[in-house]
Image: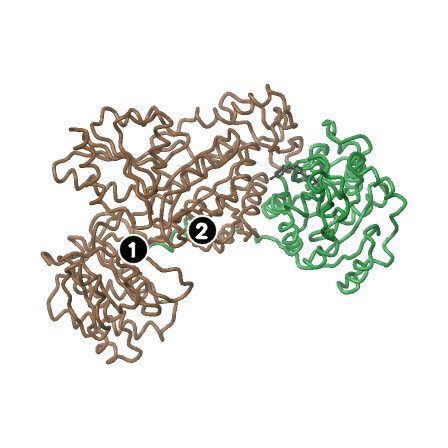
Chain colours: A brown, B green
Amino acid sequence: MTERPTLAGGATLAITGSGGSGAVTAGLILLAAVGRAGYFGLLGRSAGPQIRGGESAAMLRFGPQPIECMGDRFDLLVGLDWENVARFADELPLDRNSLILTDAQAGPIPEILVRSGAQVRSLPWKALADAETEGRVNMVALGMVGAMLGLPLDALEAGVRATLGGKGGRILTPSLDCVRSGYAAAAAAPVPSTTLHPAVARWNISGNEAAGLGAVRGGVRFVAAYPITPASEVLEWLAPRLELLGGSLLQAEDELASINMIIGSSFGGVPSLTATSGPGLSLMVEGLGLAVASETPVVVVNVQRGGPSTGIPTKSEQSDLNIALYGLHGDAPHLVLAALGIRDCIDTVEWAVGLAEHLQTVAIVLSDQMLGQSRAIIDPPGDQAFGACTRPHMRRLIAGAADSDHRRYRPAPDGVSPMALPGVPGGMYTAEGLEHGAGGTPSSRAIDHAEQLGKRLHKLTGFDYGPSWAEIRGEGDHLLLTWGSSAGPVFEAAERLRDSGTPTRVIALRLLEPLQREALLEAIGSAGSILVVEQNQTAQCFAYLHSQQALPAHARSYARAGPLPLRPAEIMGALIECHEREET
Amino acid sequence: MDAASITPTLRAKDYKSEVAPVWCPGCGHFAVLSAVTKALAHLKLAKERVAMISGIGCSSRLPAYVDAFGFHGIHGRALPLASGLKAARPDLTVIVTGGDGDGFSIGGNHFLHACRRNMDLTYIVMDNEVYGMTKGQASPTTQPDWAKSKLTPHGTGMRPFLPTAIALAAGASFIARGFAGDPNGLTKLLVEAIEHPGFAFLQVLSPCQTFRPEQKEWKHLVHPVDMAPTADSVEAARSIQADDGMALGLFYARRLPVWQPQNQATATPADLEREFAL
Ligand SMILES: Cc1ncc(C[n+]2csc(CCOP(=O)(O)OP(=O)(O)O)c2C)c(N)n1
């Protein structure tokens, strides 16, 4: 090992263990503790397909700056035991600078990990745990690792209390004892302890919770949904909290029901949302067409998993872009957005709710397993999505009782016509999925079709979305273009390229449809090498951008299927290769 | 003041919209429309507090013909659409209309769960044992030997779906059958269904003159349910099992817990945010 990883210098570690070993619990505590010490952190987790128990791995990265991806490799691998860990081996890149911490009593380290050349240190976790009443190896290991990283003991204890406090003293007390015991044993080799004091109190939040929070911040008060991995936590977070807000969540019999339920509730005037993953989104597309045609605002958060079909439910990919863009039948303009990180899930979902409400249309927000099921220490969001960058808070245009000649679908200059809510005298109309005239009566006349198609398209394409359509970072002739959760590793790749003397810019798209083509072309400018990075097999975004004539001909694609996360180093390599091809 | 109390008394025709029905001459659905408007007038419901929700099919066109709020949705999905509306707006009277294909075939699963969920909805299925709008295919309630459809030239060979029996098994709290040829009886049943707190299922025999002209005979075949309405599901099951499909009236009505959202806000999003603070 060249340099010992510390909080201040940044550290990456993985904790692995079989079912019941508490690897993920240890990871959650470490993340909370690091946050309390004033640092940023990211916790991803990986689990096999088993329902309960089974082996799992917690992957963590810490440092003094916000952390947006897991990096290329792990400094530390904390092996509580080795049962089945080989399944995760390709998710745990180690090298000869890595250090494997384990207890010799946990048995032999799997060959595949040994081959990485990582150094190994055996620590007496089991013996220390046995010395405590109800002692637990994971807690002893946690204390030791905390000490080695330079984490103050009180932050570690606070992390234990925050994570296990709800479980009562019978768990909490022995856990604290074990953590202290491990910490003391490690402190034999002294570690520098530091606590940062950030100006703002930070948050510890998962992407799925962040999406739920963005929804309620945007005004959502009704949710109907059907459980599906990895979207269920959005719903689990929302169900009790919507009740506190005076709203409700209804567990539907399937996704066909959930999308239609939220169309019904939104028709009633309540901002509404559903969350799902790929297979569920497939079932919803007919309903989404109804929402587009009837101009009923709804938001779908699609937490992507590996596809097609039921694919890899517990792991990440970005391969639902095509269905989000093209799944609806007919000419059905709608919004497609993608969150660029865990914190961004808050703002992007809140923005999507506002846009859907204001434009009376469908917004599909693409998140994915990596964002949804990871937790991070973040700076809290501003009071409103994207702070001052967005337009004034967007609300639905509601027709009042006084509006004479209210015609629900009357074309307006901006395409948005006021919507009468049930209960408004004189506002009666029938919302319609069939093509209709301005009043809502079904019509098969070409003139009505043209008028309504135009209304529904132009209200979206003519709207000024402001600067939040993308996040643009850095300067330089090299350009990395990306979308959604790939932004994290892309930002890091660009930063490292800049540090090594290759000025690199990033454009990360948050609003994919309607594509802000002019703004995008302007942002691309005369970039020399352009690489579009995404996590799917068939370069879905690259193909889309080309189809929209939004990319210069020399742009290249770097698309790779999941579920292994994109690593900054591979993106750097791909950009340099792309550049070299330009040169020759 | 409550909106309903300031509504001047309206007559049935005041609840009719200006949209002209697309139905064939002689279609049973005209009588259902008329019964709906009579029931609304009888109950003195303010037009703007009524929402008529439907799927797709001839029968599902009905909402546009009523001067109330309405939603003409997609095939088979009227019940979830209505359930979402009712959950969000418990103050509205929500009436769902559709056909036997819409409700029992493509929407069959929603029918089961709407019965179980027991939200305060009225569900009128206009049953003509045929798909009218797509021009005469067999529906779930079609007899197995009806061979007039090009899709099933030998008949369906399947036993028909039994709407009332299935509604009872699925937990519906109000089950009745009406007939388009008996407008007064139908109006009375509709009033009871709307007044019933919970999921009220009303099967209406509504003849299709175009594709099932033999249904003209129905007027000779219908007869009253041969027992008094009951709240006992075993007794109701007995009368439903003995039924020849032509019995008119109320089979079953029972007060069961009604699904209702909790609507009292005790927190704001800012309060929720505190849980994330370190
Ligand atoms: C998803 C979907 N599949 C098929 C159709 C075509 N379709 C329209 S109406 C209908 C059947 C209507 O029959 P029913 O519900 O019995 O009502 P009726 O027309 O007889 O009143 C069908 C199959 C559709 N609109 N949508």
Tell me if I can see residue B211 in this picture: yes
Residue on which disc 1 sits: A43
Tell me if I can see residue B38 in this picture: no
Q: Position of residue A381 (x, y in %)?
A: 34, 44
Residue on which disc 2 sits: A310
Quadrant of the rendered image containing residue B241: bottom right
Task: Check the image and name the residue furthest to the left.
Answer: A2
Residue shown at the point (79%, 58%) measured from the top left:
B240
Above or below for A392 versus A147:
above
Above or below for A321 versus A106:
above
Q: Where in the image, quadrant-wise, is ligand 1 located?
A: top right
Image quadrant in which the N terminus of chain B is located = top right
Q: Position of residue A340 (x, y in %)?
A: 33, 42
A150 and A462: which is toward the camera: A462
Same chain for labels 1 and 2? Say yes or no.
Answer: yes
CA neighbours of label 1 inside 10 A, class few (<14), some (14 to 19), many (20+) = many
Quadrant of the rendered image containing residue A578: top left
**What chain does mark 2 sit on?**
A
**What chain does mark 1 sit on?**
A
Q: Position of residue B39 (x, y in %)?
A: 79, 41
Quadrant of the rendered image containing residue A576: top left
Q: Select label 1 or label 2 by which is in front.
A: 2
- Sequence-first tag of 1 and 2: 1
Dot 1 and dot 2 residues touching (CB under 8 Å)? no
Task: Check the image and name the residue furthest to the right.
Answer: B220
Residue shown at the point (46%, 37%) measured from the top left:
A363
Q: Amino acid at mark 2?
A: Thr
